[in-house]
Image: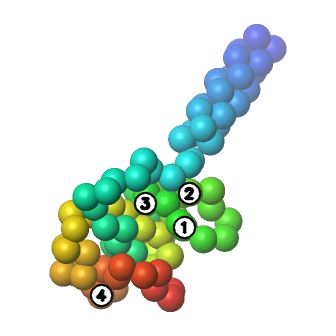
Amino acid sequence: MKTIVTSSIGAVLAASLASAAHAGPAKPQPNMDKCYGISLAGKNDCAAGAGTSCAGTSHANYQGNAWKYVAKGTCEKIKTPKGFGSLTPKKG
């Protein structure tokens, strides 16, 4: 039983370390715009505010301070249930 518990703890620790290693910003995309308020929870490319570490760490769908890369010129045309995408952070 002790071996199973130790193995389980090791697996959980390894998984959490692996996910923390990927929490940096997405690579710069020169032909893309950063579009705020369009990503689903956990699917942002970066800038998700206090309590988050970056890519993939937004807590809510369409979070106004989390951005995702989109094709240049399309951001403000993307409609979500909370309004349109923005090239600057949105409140709320």
Q: Is residue 86 left or right of residue 41?
A: left
Disc 4 to disc 2: CB gap under 8 Å: no
- Residue at 37%, 68% (x, y): give it: 34
x, y percent for residue 54: 56, 57
Image height check: is 39 above or below 83?
A: above
**In the rendered structure, which disc, 3 or 2, sits on the residue that comes first in sequence?**
3
User: Which mark sits nearer the N-terminus, 4 or 2?
Assistant: 2
At which x and y percent is residue 22?
54, 41
**Separation of disc 1 and disc 2 at Cα?**
6 Å
Tell me: 56 left or right of 17.
Answer: left
Q: Which residue is mark 2?
A: 54
Q: Secondary structure at mark 4?
A: strand
Residue topped by disc 4: 83
Q: Secondary structure at mark 1?
A: loop
Type of the residue with mark 1: Ala
- Give the percent coordinates (x, y) of residue 55: 50, 54
Q: CA distance from mark 3 to mark 1?
A: 8 Å
- Residue 42 visible here: no
Q: Earlier in the sequence, mark 4 or mark 1?
A: 1
Quick check: marks 4 and 1 in contact, CB under 8 Å?
no
Closer to viewer: mark 4 or mark 2: 2
Label 1 close to label 2 by CB (< 8 Å): yes
Secondary structure of the residue carrying tag 2 is: loop
Q: Which residue is mark 1?
A: 48
| Residue 62 location, quadrant | bottom left
Q: Residue at x 25, y 58 (%)?
A: 31
Label 1 neighbour load within 10 Å: few <14, some 14-19, many 20+: many
Neighbourhood count class around disc 4 (C-alpha, 10 Å): few under 14, some 14–19, many 20 upward:
few
Q: From the image, tell me which residue sits under label 3.
A: 44
